[in-house]
Image (cartoon, rainbow, N blue to C red):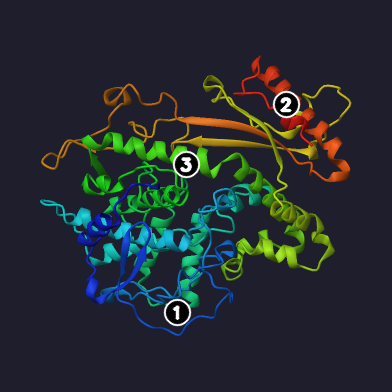
Amino acid sequence: MGACLNNEDLSRLTLETSTVDPWNSKHVHDSVHGNIYLDKVITVPSLPYYSSQNRLLQLRDLKQLVDLFKTINALCVGAEGLKVVTDSVFIDISGVTHMVYPGAVHSRFEHSLGVYWLAGAAINMIKNLPGEDLGIDHFDIQTVKLAGLLHDVGHGPFSHVFEREFLPRVLNGCQWSHEEMSRKMIEHIADEHYIEIEREMLNKVEEMVVASKENAPSKSSKEKLFLYDIVANGRNGIDVDKFDYMVRDSRACRLGYEFQFPRLLENMRVIDDEICYRAKECLTVHKLFYMRADLHRTVYTHAKVKAIELMIVDALTKANDELQIAPSIQDPATYWKLDDTIIKTIETHPSPKLKESKDLIQRIRRRELYQFCNEFSVPKEKLEHFKTVTPQDIICSQKSCGVTIKEEDIVVANVKIDMTRGRNNPVDRRTRCLFSQDYETNDKFTIEDERISHLLPSGHQDMIVRVYSKKPELVSERILNIYSFAAVCEAFDNFQVKTYGKIIQVHATPEKKKHQR
């Protein structure tokens, strides 16, 4: 079963904390939140379809969420609500996860609606707290909801794979973020579709979207800074974006996680311009971060998911010069056309220069993935001085055994999984996760782990090193590939002994996998 949340209860919670009139609003039924009510809808001429396919059925050919959704078309501005010209296009929020978890095919379309709805619920919950006068007005509510709606509009194809794996490789480590691209896309949408929106609101929406980045620009306003913690919280990582995607992903993958985010919505308040939570919910906060880390280990960085990601990155890299994929990030007018269908473009393109990319994609289709050899978790005491393991490190650890493996034969994935704050505890004084005793006092404080429970983890980051063999299992080369795979496994074992004095992987690679026909 999926996450045990009652749709009726969630819908009631968010509706009761919303200023939306359900009788005069457009609503969409969501699998997580029940009915999502949208501010007053206006009708504008439909934008052209970007694909004639039925997007509700062809979710594996998901389209980029740029103008957001066409079925609703527009949300009003100012006193009438929000306005953004939209298009019903989809992109899979979980990258390539659906190739391993077939049910994980929900889209960023759904996620963005969910964050929009929860952002509205959160700010109205804060506004309606008894005895609080925070000066929250209609402008603030609409700004936060619009930020929730558009927070992911800058994502590229295959979600974070494009940003963290592909672009650094082809742009020599160039720093680029989907948050900053979201800011540019919001400007592009407003200009391209002549959206009449106050400049102040547009600026604040953009600031809220990039608020979680370390190098986020200074906020234009020094008042109501707590508003920037709702959608993308750069202070402590607790935000409605996580609330939505964690529950949505765990439900889609049928993992059975339980995270009752309404408890956090119901038990937050603002003290000294910062969102705090009642101390009794400290374990709920811990559960949020633990569940996020477990989703990364179980789903997002699953060994086969990672193998497919590595193959897609190689395919995109080999096709980059011919199709000019990376340069599209320079221009929003070009970037919005770039989506998951780039794989189909490569497959059907007539250029012979794309043969290597096409072969890789065909291997994915046939499930001839890069072969997972083994993995180890870096010892806790070695994390601080850990250096990225490269294919060259593994090659240099091979012994003479009749088969010589080359650097291009293997790929190493250094997978970092943490609880949002690297090796730091996400709930301590350094991360500014603040609590209060009740609604009658204005004292805020942090809570150390040892005061909560002795069962909480003592470490907060894993670094997993995985090695894959790239050799395809072609019939004519099958015997050679078997020995090559075994040689890679042996070199990986030798590397561990050389680095840590012993083999630290959980178990040896099964002999039958090394010699299977």
Residue for badge 1? 194
Q: What element carries label 2?
A: helix
Q: Which of 126 and 246 is in front in this view?
A: 246
Kindly tell me whether residue 269 is visible in this rendering: no
Q: Name the spot of residue 422 as percent of width and height, x first.
A: 47, 34
Q: Is mark 3 on a helix, strand or loop?
A: helix
How much space separates mark 2 and mark 1, taking CA atoms? 64 Å
How much space separates mark 2 and mark 3, taking CA atoms? 30 Å
Few, some or many residues within 10 Å of mark 2 (<14, 14–19, 20+): few
Few, some or many residues within 10 Å of mark 1 (<14, 14–19, 20+): few
- Mark 1 / mark 3, whichever is N-terminal: 1
Q: In which quarter of the image is residue 321?
A: bottom right
Mark 2 in CB contact with mark 3 (< 8 angstroms): no
In this rendering, position of residue 368 left or right of residue 133: right
Residue for badge 2? 511
- Mark 2 / mark 1, whichever is N-terminal: 1
Q: Quadrant of residue 475?
A: top right
Q: Is mark 1 on a helix, strand or loop?
A: loop
Mark 1 in CB contact with mark 3 (< 8 angstroms): no
Three-letter residue code for mark 1:
Tyr
- Mark 2 / mark 3, whichever is N-terminal: 3
Residue for badge 3? 295
- In percent of the image, x 40 and y 36: which residue is there? 290
Q: Quadrant of residue 456?
A: top left
